[in-house]
Image (tube, grey):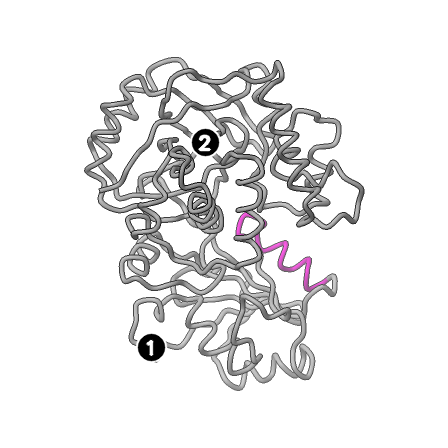
């Protein structure tokens, strides 16, 4: 039984929402954050990427960065561009991207649910990223950004969402990337909280490190009751879309020509004009200026996670031919979110940044659930969810 916890949101006044709202911290680097926040003094990037307000070259893990983020959040909260809700609420959050709607509930979830596997994970977290997010949370005394969770479709919860969207929204804005973000306050908060108890499990879609950091922060603040909850947008699975998470390989043994021949000797490769695989079990390789389609051999493993395309890729190509046995740490492999398209893969190879690109077929939401339910973990970078949430619209202070 999942816990849905209302909270008293700190949020921008409606006329400033478009200026405040920004992309999540982990989809851009510092250089990109500086560019996006340039000339935008109220952008929430000043809170979640505070190194942009310090000299270039500053260590983003220095204490000065965390203190700057906390100071920026305090200024944000005390200024005229925000308001603090007096009543604890939950919200409906709808995104529209290229005409496709994705609608969920914005509220807080319980650290205890995360710790006791009511909220199920599918990826390992890296200690350095855990440490970074934990320090941000504790220094700011806030969860500045929501995570993205998913749950199995529930008709009772869906009814509340539909009724809520009849009313006037708190925010209705279209971001620079064309995605429309609309937020409504749920009038019958207690009713929705009660209905949500029928949801047995939640699944992490995006935000594994923020979940773990929230758990660690709560352990360090045992007397702070509100620190035991962290914000999430919870989407029914029927609304979710997973894009491919593609790969690039920096260096090939013997060079691209020799390696391409090695691949052709080992696998059945076919030149293709379509760089996006058409079905599970298929990949496309970009090497020597040519796209080649390939079917992945069946796995020798016995677990559900072994059947994932990303697992089969590692078993039959990355590990035996490239000696990439730990993609999470190996500098010879990089990952490219599917939202960037296959032209980005071509650009990286043609520009000399990589010697081969691998275009994947997307992992399905059913595969994510099956792996999570089995208590297993996916290989790194198995899923890329779109559209992304905007940060800075509803902040959880504790």
Residue occupied by mark 1: 301
Magenta-drawn stretch contains 343? yes
366 is higher (above) or lower (below) than 184:
below
Residue picked out by circle 2: 96
Instruction: Judge from the rendering whether residue 181 lies leftward or rightward of residue 121; answer left or right.
Output: right
- Looking at the rendering, the stretch of residues picked out in magenta corresponds to 337-350
| Secondary structure mostly seen in the magenta stretch | helix
Q: Position of residue 327 (x, y in %)?
A: 54, 69
In the rendered image, the vertical position of residue 32 relative to residue 39, given as above or below: below
Q: Residues within 10 Å of mark 1 (few under 14, many from 20)?
A: few
Q: Residue at x 59, y 33 (%)?
A: 22
> Dots 2 and 1: beta carbons under 8 Å?
no
Considering only order in the chain, which callout, 1 or 2, is on the residue closer to the N terminus? 2
Quarter of the image with the N terminus is: top left
* Residue 74 x/y as whole percent: 61, 26
The residue depicted at 53 percent of the width and 15 percent of the height is: 14
In this view of the protein, which residue sits in the foreground, 118 or 152? 118
For marks 2 and 1, give the one nearer the viewer. Answer: 1
Horizontal side of residue 381 vs 49, given as left or right? left
């Amino acid at each position: 039984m999942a816990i849905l916890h209302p909270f008293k949101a700190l949020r921008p006044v409606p006329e400033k929402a478009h200026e405040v709202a920004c992309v999540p911290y982990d989809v851009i680097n510092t250089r990109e954050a500086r560019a996006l926040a340039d000339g935008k003094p109220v952008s929430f990037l000043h809170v979640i990427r505070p190194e942009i307000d310090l000299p270039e070259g500053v260590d983003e893990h220095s204490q000065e960065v965390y203190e700057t983020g906390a100071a920026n959040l305090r200024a944000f909260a005390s200024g005229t561009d925000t308001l603090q809700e007096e009543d604890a609420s939950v919200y409906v959050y709808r995104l529209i991207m290229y005409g496709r709607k994705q609608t969920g509930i914005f509220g807080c979830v319980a650290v205890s649910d995360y710790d006791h596997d009511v909220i199920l994970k599918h990826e390992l977290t890296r200690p350095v990223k855990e440490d970074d997010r934990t320090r941000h949370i504790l220094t700011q005394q806030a969860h500045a950004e929501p995570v993205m969770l998913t749950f199995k479709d529930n008709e009772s919860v869906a009814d509340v969402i539909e009724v809520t969207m009849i009313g006037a929204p708190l925010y209705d804005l279209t971001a620079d990337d064309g995605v429309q973000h609309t937020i409504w306050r749920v009038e019958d908060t207690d009713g929705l909280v009660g209905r949500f108890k029928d949801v047995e499990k939640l699944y992490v879609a995006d935000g594994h490190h923020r979940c773990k950091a929230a758990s660690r922060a709560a352990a360090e603040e045992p007397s702070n009751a509100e620190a035991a909850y962290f914000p999430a947008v919870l989407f029914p699975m029927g609304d979710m879309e997973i894009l491919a998470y593609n790969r690039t390989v920096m260096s090939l043994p013997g060079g691209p020509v020799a390696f391409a021949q090695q691949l052709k000797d080992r696998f059945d490769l076919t030149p293709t004009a379509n760089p996006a695989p058409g079905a599970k079990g298929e990949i496309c390789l970009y090497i020597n200026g040519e796209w080649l389609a390939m079917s992945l051999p069946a796995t020798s493993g016995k677990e559900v996670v072994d059947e994932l395309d990303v697992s089969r890729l590692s078993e039959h190509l990355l590990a035996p031919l490239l000696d990439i046995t730990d993609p999470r740490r190996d500098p010879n492999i990089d990952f490219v979110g599917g939202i960037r398209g296959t032209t980005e893969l071509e650009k990286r190879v043609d520009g000399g940044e990589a010697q081969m690109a691998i275009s994947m077929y997307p992992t399905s939401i059913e595969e994510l659930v099956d792996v999570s339910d089995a208590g297993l973990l996916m290989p790194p970078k198995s899923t890329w969810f779109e559209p992304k949430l905007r940060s800075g619209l509803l902040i959880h202070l504790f």
